[in-house]
């Protein structure tokens, strides 16, 4: 048997190549796994080519490293062909591993690769064309075959584990499995070579015409190494690209999620929005119908929220709305839905509540929690809620009608004095229709001059002299007759017509006074009622001065009555406007005093000359001692503040006598004169001094 040796440098070179090859192989597996369709196929082919040729190059350099006593060569065709089985095996292995892996697949891939490497090895040895034929040592042969299969399988298995495991140290473990696989490939080759037995006197026929030499080994290593590095480079670049694409896809996904969220939520409070509630009810109501449970929809609107926004600014308004959202959420169970429909409108959807009493309790809780004052940017802000409730199936069979009816019920709660709740009743629908028609008619009535002003004298209780008039608006409706303010003033306020209505009344009053003066009628101050909306509209004072400009009337002839609740709401802003009016010489009275919630300190700041005691106290005093006490207290308070008091709604002599005794100076009521059309007023004003004694 011929002695065998190896060129150590070439052996090392072949092992290094094998390890690099394995490392690149694992990288390519990742690319195939993350690609679809043609890209995956292309990566498999590319990988098989690069890896197969790498293993082949390792093997060939290993062969060139072989040193025996005789010259060796390698038949070019056979050597090239020996690369085929390993390329096929690599391709199959890559494809198998890139898809789903399980134990069977790993063993199959390992076996294929092992067999491919072994086949290449034996074909490569044949390329030496030894004569006589070389012999094989069965033990080493078996060992190399076993190593080929077991080593490949183990390396692949290890690599799988890495992919499934934690990200930490992944890089090192990848190098480890590359070392294992590369080492296996090299080991198979050198074990296989150990099995080769060169018979004495044998010659390599290929030494004449075949491939040989150190230069060739280096050239093959260089080409193969470059090819592998190129593959690795492309693979890494491709991975980078894939990651960027994935990141973009993820960002797109997140953007889409955010958009969907926005479409179904209110941005300010993060509560569900109208679309969300419609969606929810669309799903919930059919279930409620089939499982026979009830669903309640509550419409919650804040009273006077607009003035918070107008006077304190939108940021304070927004913050306040967020606190309202919290209060609402705290008022209901977690499974109930609190939504914001925009502005100061919130909707609560409750399912499977126990009873109507249960709903009443929830309404009360909402009232209590939402009405609490909150500190926002140093301001003490509060607004009460008005709540309307509609129930499924009683008040509506679909989302739209339930919401509409809850809304109507909410309006009804507002009409009944706000800060309360109302359950829907069918008559509300009729009322709402009525209101709609009337508000459309009012708009036209304002243009057509259907509004009139009546006048009611204010009388000095001691002398019964007429000391002033109050202008009270009337609407002579073409079909409904003469309408009183309560049936259309709130409507005007609700539909943005308050300003126009105020303007019309003021113009009428001014024209009337000018006309009376021209006729020589002695004039007394005339009180005009103004709504909060008019005062808050920034153009009130300008409009007033414009109306008065050509009339030649002194400002002191006009008094403004503003209700107590209006004067107290939105205090700062209102106060500024009222001060401006005072500075211009107009008089001011607080109307319906006793019904609002005045703070005394605020009352003191108001530039007012008189207080009008609400008629409910005057009329209640006869049978209700509390009303009597309150009235007397108001009169005493007014005195202390040096304000004159006017008692409204005096209907009997007894009332007049008691009020006068209590210290009230002026009265107004049916006892003296009811509100009269303008043509009947001059006679009173002219006769006033004459009748002073007889009245
Ligand atoms: P107010 O300013 O408190 O007016 C007094 C109301 O009491 C008037 O009702 C008057 O007719 C009524 N009244 C007078 N004496 C008696 C009496 O002895 N007994 C009873 N039961 N009632 C008496 P009216 O004219 O229906 O006006 C109601 C409210 O409408 C007014 O209350 C005022 O707040 C508002 N209003 C009237 N005119 C205008 C207006 O031009 N603009 C605005 N914004 N509001 C107005
Ligand atoms: Mg009044
Ligand atoms: Mg009044």
Image (cartoon, rainbow, N blue to C red):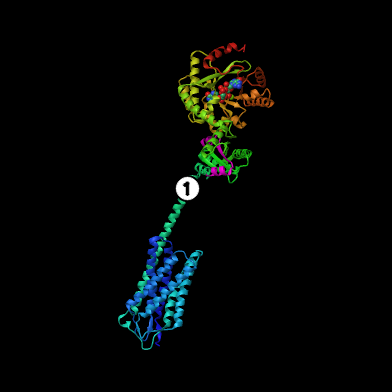
Asked whether residue 206 appears in the rendered view, the answer is yes
Is 296 part of what is drawn in magenta?
Answer: yes
Instruction: Indicate the quadrant where residue 695 lies.
Output: top right
Image quadrant of residue 121? Answer: bottom left
- Left-right relation of 182 to 521: left
Q: Residue furthest left?
A: 209
- Residue 79 found in image quarter: bottom left
Give residue 395's position: percent from left, percent from top.
56, 36
SS of the residue at dot 1? helix
Name the residue: 61% across, 32% down: 599
Task: Look at the picture and state if 188 lies above or below 600.
Answer: below
What number of labels is visible? Answer: 1
Which residue is identified by label 1? Answer: 260
Establish if 250 lies above or below 473. below
Q: Which is nearer the eye, 576 or 674?
A: 674
Location of residue 91 with respect to 196 vertically, above or below: above
User: Can residue 303 be seen from the camera position used here?
Assistant: no
Quarter of the picture holding the N terminus: bottom left
Query: Which residues, given as a range, are shown in magenta?
Result: 283-311
How far across and how far down the image is residue 423, in percent? 59, 35
Q: Would you say residue 494 sits in the magenta stretch?
A: no
**Dividing the image into four equal quarters, which quarter contains ligand 3?**
top right
| Front position in the image: 87 or 614 | 87
Task: Report if the beta carbon of the residue with label 1 is closer than 8 angstroms to ligand 1.
Answer: no
Position in image of residue 113 (x %, y %): 43, 72
Q: Residues within 10 Å of mark 1 (few under 14, many from 20)?
A: few
Residue 396 in the image, given as x and y percentages of width and height: 54, 37
Q: Is 224 in front, or is 133?
A: 133
* Whether residue 599 is situated above or below residue 18 in the rendered picture: above
């Amino acid at each position: 048997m011929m002695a065998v040796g190896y060129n150590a440098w070439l052996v090392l070179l072949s092992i290094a190549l094998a390890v690099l090859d394995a490392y690149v192989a694992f990288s390519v597996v990742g690319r195939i796994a993350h690609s679809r369709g043609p890209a995956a196929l292309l990566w498999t082919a590319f990988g098989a080519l690069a890896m197969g040729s790498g293993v082949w190059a390792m093997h060939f350099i290993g062969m060139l490293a072989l040193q025996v006593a005789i010259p060796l060569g390698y038949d070019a065709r056979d050597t090239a062909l020996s690369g085929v089985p390993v390329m096929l095996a690599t391709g199959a292995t890559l494809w198998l591993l890139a898809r789903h892996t399980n134990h069977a697949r790993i063993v199959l891939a390992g076996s294929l690769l092992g067999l491919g490497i072994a086949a290449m090895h034996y074909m490569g040895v044949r390329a030496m064309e030894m004569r006589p034929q070389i012999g094989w040592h069965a033990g080493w042969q078996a060992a190399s075959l076993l190593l080929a299969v077991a080593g490949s399988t183990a390396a692949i298995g290890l690599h799988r584990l890495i992919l499934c495991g934690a990200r930490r140290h992944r890089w090192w473990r990848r190098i480890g499995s590359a070392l294992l696989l590369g080492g296996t490939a090299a080991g198979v080759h050198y074990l296989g070579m150990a099995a080769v037995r060169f018979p004495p006197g044998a010659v390599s026929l290929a030494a004449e015409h075949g491939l040989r030499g150190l230069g060739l080994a280096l050239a093959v290593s260089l080409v193969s190494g470059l090819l592998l590095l190129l593959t690795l480079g492309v693979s890494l670049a491709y991975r980078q690209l894939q990651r960027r694409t994935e990141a973009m896809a993820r960002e797109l996904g997140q953007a889409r999620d955010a958009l969907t969220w926005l479409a179904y939520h209110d941005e300010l409070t993060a509560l569900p929005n109208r679309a969300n509630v419609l969606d929810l009810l669309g799903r919930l109501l059919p279930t409620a119908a089939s499982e026979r449970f009830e669903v309640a929809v509550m419409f919650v609107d804040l009273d006077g929220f607009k003035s918070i926004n107008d006077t304190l600014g939108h940021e304070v308004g927004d913050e306040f709305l967020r606190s309202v959202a919290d209060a609402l959420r705290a008022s209901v169970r977690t499974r109930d839905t609190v939504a914001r429909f925009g502005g100061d409108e919130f909707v609560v959807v409750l399912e499977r509540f126990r009873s109507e009493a249960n709903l009443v309790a929830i309404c009360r809780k909402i009232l209590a929690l939402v009405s609490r004052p909150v500190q926002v940017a140093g301001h003490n802000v509060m607004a009460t809620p008005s709540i309307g409730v509609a129930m499924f199936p009683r008040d509506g069979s679909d989302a739209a009608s339930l919401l509409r009816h809850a809304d109507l019920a909410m309006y009804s709660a507002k009409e009944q004095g706000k800060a309360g709740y109302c359950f829907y009743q069918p008559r509300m629908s009729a009322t709402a229709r009525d209101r709609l028609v009337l508000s459309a008619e009012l708009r036209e009535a304002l243009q057509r001059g259907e509004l009139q002003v009546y006048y009611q004298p204010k009388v000095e209780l001691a002398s019964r002299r007429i000391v002033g008039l109050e202008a009270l608006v009337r609407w002579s409706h073409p079909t409904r007759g003469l309408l009183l303010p309560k049936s259309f003033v709130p409507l005007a306020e609700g539909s943005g017509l308050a300003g126009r209505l105020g303007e019309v009344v003021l113009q009428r009053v001014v024209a009337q006074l000018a006309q009376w003066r021209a006729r020589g009628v002695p004039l007394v101050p005339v009180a005009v009622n103004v709504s909060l909306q008019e005062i808050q509209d920034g153009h009130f004072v300008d409009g007033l001065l414009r109306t008065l400009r050509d009339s030649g009337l002194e400002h002191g002839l006009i008094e403004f009555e503003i209700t107590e609740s209006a004067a107290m709401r939105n205090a700062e802003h209102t106060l500024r406007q009222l001060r401006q009016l005072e500075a211009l010489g107009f008089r001011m009275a607080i109307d319906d005093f006793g019904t609002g919630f005045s703070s005394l300190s605020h009352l003191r700041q108001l530039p007012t000359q008189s207080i009008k005691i609400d008629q409910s106290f005057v009329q209640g005093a006869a049978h209700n001692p509390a009303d009597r006490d309150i009235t007397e207290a108001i009169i005493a308070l007014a005195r202390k503040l040096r304000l004159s008091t006017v008692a409204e709604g005096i209907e009997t002599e007894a009332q007049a006598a008691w009020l006068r005794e209590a210290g009230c100076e002026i009265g107004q009521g049916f006892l003296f004169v009811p509100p009269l059309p303008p043509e009947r007023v001059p006679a009173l004003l002219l006769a006033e001094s004459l009748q002073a004694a007889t009245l």
